[in-house]
Image (spheres, coloured by chain):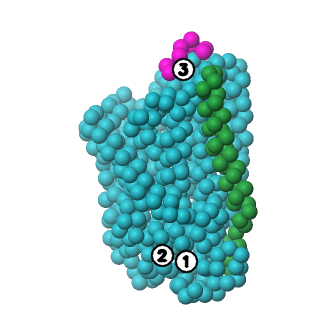
Chain colours: A green, B cyan
Amino acid sequence: MSAAAVTMMCIAIVIVWGGLVAAILRLRKHPDVPDDDASGEPV
Amino acid sequence: MPQKARERWGSRTGFLLAAIGSAIGLGNIWRFPAEAYKNGGGAFLLPYLIALLTAGLPLLILEYTVGRKYRRSPPAAFRQLAKPVQVIGWWQVAICFVIATYYSVILAWAVRYVGFSVGEQWGDNPEEFLFGDFLQAAETPGDVSGYVAGVFWPLLAVWLVVLVVLAFGVRRGIERANMLFIPLLVIFFAVLVIRALTLDGAAGGLDALFSPDWSALGEGSVWVAAYGQIFFSLSIGFGIMVTYASYLGRRADLSGSALVAGFANSSFEILAGIGVFATLGFMAQAEGVPVDEVATEGLGLAFVAFPTVISSMPTGWLFGLLFFVSLAIAGFTSLVSIVQVVVASVQDRTGMSRVPAVLSVGGLIAVVSLLLFSSDNGVWFLDASDHFINQYGIALAALVFVVVVAWWLRALPQLQEHANATSAVRLGKWWLFFLGLVTPLGLGWMMVDSLRSEFDENYGGFTDDFLLKYGWGVAIGALVVGILLSLIPWRHTDELPLSEPGRGSGPPTGGPGTSGTGTSGTGTAGTGTAGTTKNGTTRERGR
């Protein structure tokens, strides 16, 4: 693989997978507040 | 008649996995790698990410917000925005109906190919095996002239499983299936990618995929391709995300979940790109040809190129098993979400219970699917209808929806406020700008570009007559059906309380951390009464 291809592959992985990890961490810091009608039982 | 409570996701993880399962589909595996390769290789990443951030995620957040705010499937939710907008919802329902009929047959093929992998039953010529022995495709595309048992039975099996999952409901059916299948898909595909990376020639394939051609960024078509890829791979514009978000709690996060789903989808695409091109690199080396001679996409990639590779590698059957099972899982979780749009819309419109709705609506889709796509012309119908319903169904409906919400109803600020009340990531003016300007321009540009190529030459080399029936006819037919369905008058008992854009059924304004405030309404199971939130907005009735 050329250096340019390796670089672009690494950038793609870091940005996209890094973006996923960052989004998950952000969401984990913000838990949903339960509703009073959150039984959610299927009907 | 007492109203029933709307179903709910069991957990945030369950919703996220279902949303990710819907987004990750066949296109991630067989479309993204080829699109990236054809449009600048590594340089494609730039327009791709820009398209994700400026159109994909903003539109995904919009769909989540509309779904969670009105807690209805697209027609009823859009009707809450403004009565005439329900046409777009019914249009999306018709589009989902069409897509479900042919998407399922690809799953049936993938299931059959899991079996074919053992013993590499395609022999020396996978292409001839696919179109001849297996599909028994008519030489000249035309009307149905016979049926293929080898496609009919697995297709019937696919439909039975889909209907059973849907009959179990949102939490016990869709959520549980995704909680099982999405981790399985990631494991299977990760193993496949690791195996692909150890093949001779893998580096050559990756070099072809990731070598940047920066000059491509000056070409408009590359940007159109990036917006198209993001748009089609995120499952936006179908009404799926509106439907799935309608089962969220009133205080559920929206924008943070959209970021997770969007980046998870793209993460899988990158993984698929690596796996597919490492494999194609091996194939090119084995055949002694450059990668561009073996690079392909769609059906050709999955059912011709991969079988060729499988036949030429040691323990190829295992590789085939991993690939076709992954393809089947990715397609299955997407198909379930597509059919759920139709089922939920009919339920919301008629008040029908889940099981009868699944059996009647899902059953009807299954029958149409079996009648058309297990025939000897199924593959030709699939090719034409897929192209036209994508371009002039999904994309056009999304364009109309965004323009209507942003420019006609001017509802974006209220929706922004609704999302911000409970979300991990605050939507700023950027969201209004991207949705109001960049997304419509991106989609509009895609539309013009696509129309231009349509008039340059007939898609796929099909005849005018065939394209009129199974291409344009399908796309225009979906719009006409959508309009007709929207014209059926709503009985008073069906009517949801209409509200001005941005009003009604809103979340408590207390936002996160204010548990217990603003939810004093009685919208619980069986009460059927409209509740009132603390801030005075009307809560829709549970059904």
Where's residue B78, x and y in %? 43, 69
Tell me the CA gap for discs 3 and 2.
Answer: 52 Å
Residue at coordinates 69% horizontally, 21% vertically from top-left?
A: B199
| Residue denoted by label 1 | B506
Q: Secondary structure at mark 1?
A: loop
Give the residue type that dot 3 points to. Answer: Val
Crowd band around label 3 with a 10 angstrom C-alpha radius: few (<14), some (14–19), many (20+): many
Q: Is residue B390 left or right of residue B348?
A: left
Relative height, residue B508 to residue B115 (above, below): below
Q: Is residue B400 left or right of residue B518?
A: left
Q: Secondary structure at mark 3?
A: helix
| Residue denoted by label 2 | B502
Where's residue B265, x and y in %? 60, 47
Which chain contains the residue that carries disc 3? B
Where's residue B458, x and y in %? 29, 35
Where's residue B212, x and y in %? 54, 29
Q: Secondary structure at mark 2?
A: loop
Q: Tags 2 and 1 in contact by the CB under 8 Å rule?
A: yes
Q: Quadrant of residue B448?
A: top left
Which region of the structure is painted magenta? B285-294
